[in-house]
Amino acid sequence: MRPEKKYLVDEVSQHLGKSDYVYLANYERITVEETAELRASLAEHDAEFHVVKNTIFNVAAQAREFPDVSEHLNGPTAIIVGGNNPSGVAKVLGEFFKKKEKVDLKVGIMNDRALSKEEIEVLAKLPGLEVLRAQLLGLLTQPGTSLVRVLNAVPQNVVNVLQAKVRKENGEG
């Protein structure tokens, strides 16, 4: 392999190492301004948008033992990688692509599994990582909170009964 191509393969491979996922998109009709807008939106999730040659991506993906997505490597291809919130990035992509009606997802790879366009759209509908963490924390604390309420109710009930008994003995009630 020529040194220039080896350099490009290494560069793409470094990009692929930035996250557990990669989304491939067709960017054919997107303008430079729109690309800058998309990159800014992705940066909020620590994700990046890179234009790559299909052959270079294919070599880098094979070297990393990714699933074969060569059937999707036609036309202009960009990769979206980075960050630790694949559903948040998928949501940004979905909203951007829907708004611009120019760019289209081709395929994705997550944890060494190929994702279809439809699976990425489902992923985009999931709540964000922070929301999922909050929901999990709520589920984990709920049984403990209920147990504390039950344990607290018994002494509270005893106190109420004793107070009522004292009031009755004192003729207050």
Image (cartoon, rainbow, N blue to C red):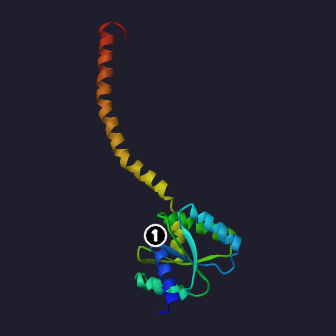
Quadrant for the C terminus in the image: top left
Q: Residue at x 32, y 36 (%)?
A: 150
Q: Is residue 7 above or below residue 23?
A: below
Q: Where's residue 52, x and y in %?
A: 56, 81
In the structure shown, which secondary structural element does the residue marked by tag 1 occupy? loop
User: Which residue position holds label 1?
Assistant: 19
Q: Where's residue 104, x and y in %?
A: 62, 77
Q: Is residue 153 left or right of residue 30?
A: left
Mark 1 is on which residue type? Ser
Q: Where's residue 61, x and y in %?
A: 45, 83
Dot 1, how many residues are within 10 Å of its Cα: few (below 14), some (14-19), or many (20+)? some
Quarter of the rendering containing residue 106: bottom right
Q: Is residue 11 above or below residue 138?
A: below
Quarter of the rendering containing residue 66: bottom left
Q: Is residue 66 above or below residue 43?
A: below
Q: Is residue 92 left or right of residue 66?
A: right
In this view of the protein, which residue sits in the foreground, 25 or 47?
47
Q: Is residue 126 above or below residue 141?
A: below
In this view of the protein, which residue sits in the foreground, 72 or 125?
72
In this view of the protein, which residue sits in the foreground, 3 or 75?
3
Q: Residue furthest top?
A: 171
Q: Is residue 100 left or right of residue 148?
A: right
Q: Residue at x 51, y 77 (%)?
A: 116
Q: Residue furthest bottom?
A: 1
Q: Residue at x 51, y 62 (%)?
A: 126
Q: Residue at x 57, y 63 (%)?
A: 43
Quarter of the rendering containing residue 53: bottom right
